[in-house]
Amino acid sequence: MRKLGFWGLVAGVVAVLAFADGVQAAAPPGSARPAASLKVKAPHHPGPGPQSGPIRYGRTVIVPRHRTRHYRDVLVLRPNGHFYRGYGYFSSDDDAYKWLAFTAITLKLLDVLNEHQQRTHEAAQVRATTAAVGETVHWSDGSAAGSVTVLRDGTSSRGRYCREFQQEVIVGGEAERAYGTACRQPDGAWEIISTRS
């Protein structure tokens, strides 16, 4: 089975979070079902360790448990790239707590980055949380480059400040983009409420 990344898990979780926050989640392309009705199925897989994953657009996405963890109340998912503590240039989860949820906005190209390049990409995401709307934060490290753009901001129906981001990673002439909307919680930490590629 081809490793597809983590979007299926996010689709189910995001639909629930978006519905709870009063933000309308988008339906899957070509689907008559609203996104809030997406179902999560944990398939049985014989083998060495337990695995689970959701169904997204008729395709199963498996996120091995060793690629997920919790820190405080944040689910940290790193289905692609290097799996490490912290986020960006913050080497501990405690220091990176406010931004750990951004691991939900992932790209398959993270698999070809080294750890320093991946952390440089994440540091651009951290900087984008305070950048002006419309501003693009660029990064470059060796053969990899990319950007994070703040597309818009606003307030959710629950009164939380939210921002929509576009991430792009370019490696060897190949580019990949992902989008995500995050809302700031009362403690200052960000929560991802929607993602798309």
Image: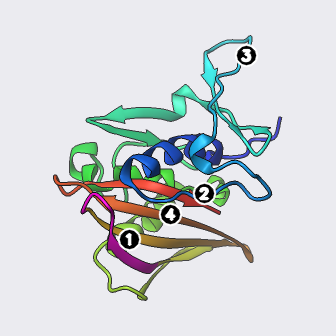
Q: Disc 1 and disc 3: Cα gap in Å?
A: 38 Å
Residue stretch in magenta = 150-159
Q: Residue furthest right?
A: 1
Residue at numbered disc 1:
163
State left or right for residue 147 relative to residue 170: left
Residue at numbered disc 4:
180
Residue at numbered disc 2:
110
Q: Residues within 10 Å of mark 3 (few under 14, many from 20)?
A: few
**Which quadrant of the structure image shows residue 164?**
bottom left
Q: Residues within 10 Å of mark 1 (few under 14, many from 20)?
A: many
**Which quadrant of the structure image shows residue 98?**
bottom left
Q: Is residue 79 visible?
A: no
Question: What secondary structure is marked by label 4?
Answer: strand
Near-viewer residue (18 or 117)? 18
- Residue drawn at x 42%, y 41% is 76
Query: Pointer 4 and pointer 3: residues touching (CB < 8 Å)?
Result: no
For marks 2 and 4, the one nearer the N-term is 2
Q: Nearer the viewer, mark 2 or mark 1?
A: 1
Question: What secondary structure is marked by label 3?
Answer: loop
- Which disc is residue 45 wearing? 3
For marks 2 and 1, the one nearer the N-term is 2
